Image (cartoon, rainbow, N blue to C red):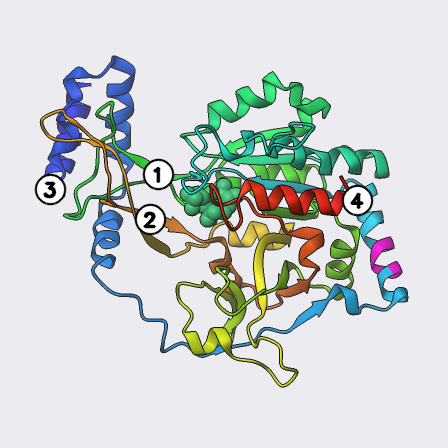
């Protein structure tokens, strides 16, 4: 241990981060070990370059942005719909579909004290978001006679509480062995001087590494391997916060399988020019998503020859991959985006500082950055009222209130 401590000290000093051992002596033996392991395995060089990147203003203006073609579900002929549905149903019945929910986010905008999925949406049934999502696999089991494996990505912060919630609710009467949790990666948070923040315990303050961390986390936790062993071919991945997400959608699988498009995303038409959604596009000839924070006013308003938004396909975080693609992209390194957030921390005198203003950098990979590596990407446009009811904010737009209304309308409650 003494030797390990000396090495950790040396490394921390080399990178000007010696304060991360300030409270070492106050930690339990287990935590001491954990901290040393973190220091010994941390990529300090990467952290340095991440901090350097906070000083450069990102420049999106040089990229060539064009529309990405889509297929509109409502424009398929009856014959096509039947054909695709049949193909999709066959795939589901053969047990070749698995679903993944990304629930590792911090959900700061909602401000709920537990993991977002545990939020009671205020329906008469008092179903939590997780229970509403679980209905997807429960209904599919009834319809197709297969219990589809459901993988849930959590973070270091919310993993235990999430599992306890499922235990307490008896996995919503879905076979427990079909639900598996896995943790996403983390990255240290930095202050404005590039120093690593410490949490209340005096350990390194880590934050989830973004939804783009899902691929690496699936690989590192052996999920992709396990899926292959089980003969899974298609994987649907979505966020925890869309309560109308259709996890199991035969027509979506069918169209992808038949058109031989190994990566697909669902979209809905952007409601108005400055709606706060990312939109699908071609960036320098490659598929991608341009965030509302990156798009110029002119481009956000631009119309095509039909009078529709040129970039009108909003990303609703409903993606579906063939296992072959997932395996390949799980080794790709995605870029990190910078967020400036409020973060409580322990200062060098041991005082806990409660942040009232943003004070710390958080680094996140975005799932959609992977699309530039998958040239055959399909955008499948569906109806907003049927598939999109986001829970993001505490009140106002995209809040539990608006999501509840959309949900009730869809189910005629
Ligand atoms: P958001 O971008 O809405 O982030 O995530 P968030 O962390 O949940 O919410 P805010 O911004 O703090 O209010 C979109 C989806 O991606 C998941 C979220 O759980 C949500 O389902 N996500 C996000 C992760 O699983 N891990 C992350 O690191 C970030």
Numbered disc 3: secondary structure: loop
**What's the residue at 54%, 31% (across, down)?**
119
Numbered disc 1: secondary structure: strand
First reached walking from the N terminus: tag 2 or tag 3: 3
Residue topped by disc 4: 92
Residue topped by disc 2: 363
Tell me if 101 is positioned left or right of 29 in this view.
right
Residue 82 visible, this angle: yes
- Marks 1 & 2, CB-CB < 8 Å contact: yes
Within the magenta stretch, is there residue 83?
yes
Which is in the foreground here, disc 4 or disc 1?
1
Q: Is residue 217 above or below residue 167?
A: below
- Marks 2 & 4, CB-CB < 8 Å contact: no
Q: Position of residue 279 (x, y in %)?
A: 53, 65
Residue topped by disc 1: 207
Q: Position of residue 332 (x, y in %)?
A: 46, 54
- Marks 4 & 3, CB-CB < 8 Å contact: no
First reached walking from the N terminus: tag 4 or tag 1: 4
**What's the residue at 17%, 32% (across, down)?**
20
Q: Main secondary structure of the magenta part?
A: helix
User: Which of 336 and 77 lies nearest the eye of the viewer?
Assistant: 77
Q: Dot 2, how many residues are within 10 Å of its Cα: few (below 14), some (14-19), or many (20+)?
A: many
Mark 1 within 8 Å of ligand 1, using the beta carbon = yes
Q: Is residue 331 above or below residue 350?
A: below
Residue topped by disc 3: 16
How far is mark 2 from mark 3, CA to CA?
20 Å
Question: Which stretch appears magenta?
Answer: 82-86
Q: Dot 3, how many residues are within 10 Å of its Cα: few (below 14), some (14-19), or many (20+)?
A: some
First reached walking from the N terminus: tag 1 or tag 2: 1
Which is in the foreground here, disc 3 or disc 1?
1
- Marks 4 & 1, CB-CB < 8 Å contact: no
């Amino acid at each position: 241990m003494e030797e390990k401590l000396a090495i950790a000290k040396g490394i921390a000093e080399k990178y000007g981060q010696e304060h991360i051992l300030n409270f070492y002596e106050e930690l339990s033996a287990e935590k001491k070990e954990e901290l040393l392991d973190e220091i010994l395995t941390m990529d300090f060089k990467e952290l340095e370059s991440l901090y350097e990147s906070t000083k450069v203003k990102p420049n999106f203006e040089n990229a060539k942005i064009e529309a990405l073609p889509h297929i509109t579900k409502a424009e398929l002929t009856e014959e096509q719909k039947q054909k695709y549905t049949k193909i999709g149903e066959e795939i589901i019945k053969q047990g070749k579909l698995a679903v993944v929910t990304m629930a590792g986010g911090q959900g700061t905008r909602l401000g709920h004290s537990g993991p977002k999925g545990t939020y009671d949406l205020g329906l008469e049934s008092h179903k939590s978001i997780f229970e509403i999502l679980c209905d997807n696999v429960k209904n599919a089991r009834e319809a197709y006679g297969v219990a589809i494996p459901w993988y849930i990505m959590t973070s270091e912060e919310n993993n235990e509480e999430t599992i306890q919630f499922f235990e307490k609710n008896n996995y919503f009467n879905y076979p427990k062995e079909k639900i598996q949790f896995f943790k996403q990666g983390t990255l240290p948070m930095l202050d404005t001087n590039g120093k690593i923040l410490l949490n209340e315990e005096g350990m390194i303050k880590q934050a989830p590494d973004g939804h783009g961390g899902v691929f690496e986390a699936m690989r590192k936790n052996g999920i992709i391997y396990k899926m292959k062993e089980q003969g899974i071919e298609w994987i649907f991945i979505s966020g925890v916060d869309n309560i109308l997400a259709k996890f199991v959608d035969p027509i979506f699988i069918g169209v992808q399988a038949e058109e031989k498009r190994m990566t697909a995303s669902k979209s809905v038409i952007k409601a108005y020019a400055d709606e706060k959604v990312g939109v699908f596009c071609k960036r320098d000839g490659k598929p991608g998503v341009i965030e509302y924070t990156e798009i110029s006013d002119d481009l956000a308003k631009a119309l095509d020859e039909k009078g529709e938004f040129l970039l009108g396909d909003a990303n609703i975080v409903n993606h579906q991959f063939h296992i072959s693609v997932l395996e390949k992209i799980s080794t790709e390194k995605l870029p990190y985006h910078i967020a400036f957030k409020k973060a409580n921390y322990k200062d060098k005198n041991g005082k806990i500082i409660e942040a009232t203003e943003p004070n710390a950098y958080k680094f996140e990979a975005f799932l959609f950055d992977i699309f530039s590596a998958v040239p055959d990407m399909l955008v499948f446009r569906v109806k907003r009222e049927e598939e999109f009811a986001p829970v993001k904010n505490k009140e106002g737009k995209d809040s539990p209130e608006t999501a509840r209304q959309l949900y009730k309308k869809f189910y005629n409650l």
